[in-house]
Amino acid sequence: MIVCMSRRICVEMYNALIHLHPEWDSDDDTTGAIKVVMSGTKSEKLEWQKHIRTKQQIKVLRKRFKDPEDPFKVVIVRDMWNTGFNAPCLTTMYVDKPMQSHGLMQAIARVDRVFKDKPGGLVVDYIGIAPRMKKALAEFTSKDHKGLDVHQLEEAVAMMMEKYQVCCDLMHGFDWSGWKSATRWADSL
């Protein structure tokens, strides 16, 4: 996983890597070794269009990336998949984006998952997040959080985010904007 500062940098990183390894490229989300996962609309720059996907297309990529046998091995992100995404087979994260506190802990937790004989994850820091990571670790292990197992907390948050995503996927396309004014729950359906 490569974490970049902006969507523009994500696309530029993708283009640079494809230039070096054209065999990794594929416009088909069911094939290819590298993808950019980022938010956007169809009115974005033409060069960005192939990287803007529907929720269903992102779901396909999530499933592929979690499969250690799949050739999809490199994902480039800005914010998506930094939190609430659990791929235990992920071993390395390349960070070129300032992060801090909870967001940093969440991102680092992407590679810190138990998986088969994986001894741990590797974070390659290109921007100097080490001081922020020390501060974030101090926050999460302070006396106020005595006895708190950060890994259990991260697992719980990741699981909750996964369930939240399932709910969002189930509600996709459903107009639930009037549910608060409904007198009975059935009226909102």
Image: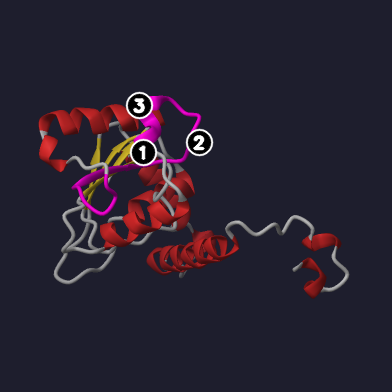
* Residue at figure coordinates x 48%, y 37% from the top left: 40
Q: Are marks 2 and 1 in contact (CB under 8 Å)?
A: no
Q: Nearer the viewer, residue 64 or 75?
A: 64
Q: Which residue is mark 2?
A: 41
Which residue is at a point 28% across and 43% down the rendered structure image? 35
The picture quadrant where one finds residue 118 is bottom left
Three-letter code, disc 3: Glu
At horizontal 75% and vertical 55% (from top left) the residue drawn is 177
Compare marks 2 and 1 and give the one earlier in the sequence: 2
Foreground residue among 58 and 109: 58
Residue position for label 3: 47
- Write down the region rendered in magenta: 28-50
Farthest-out residue, right: 183
Rendering coords of residue 59 (x, y %):
39, 58
Find out whether residue 60 is within the magenta segment: no
Q: Amino acid at mark 1?
A: His
Q: Are marks 3 and 2 in contact (CB under 8 Å)?
A: no
The residue at 47%/28% (across/down) is 44
Quarter residue 91 falls in:
bottom left
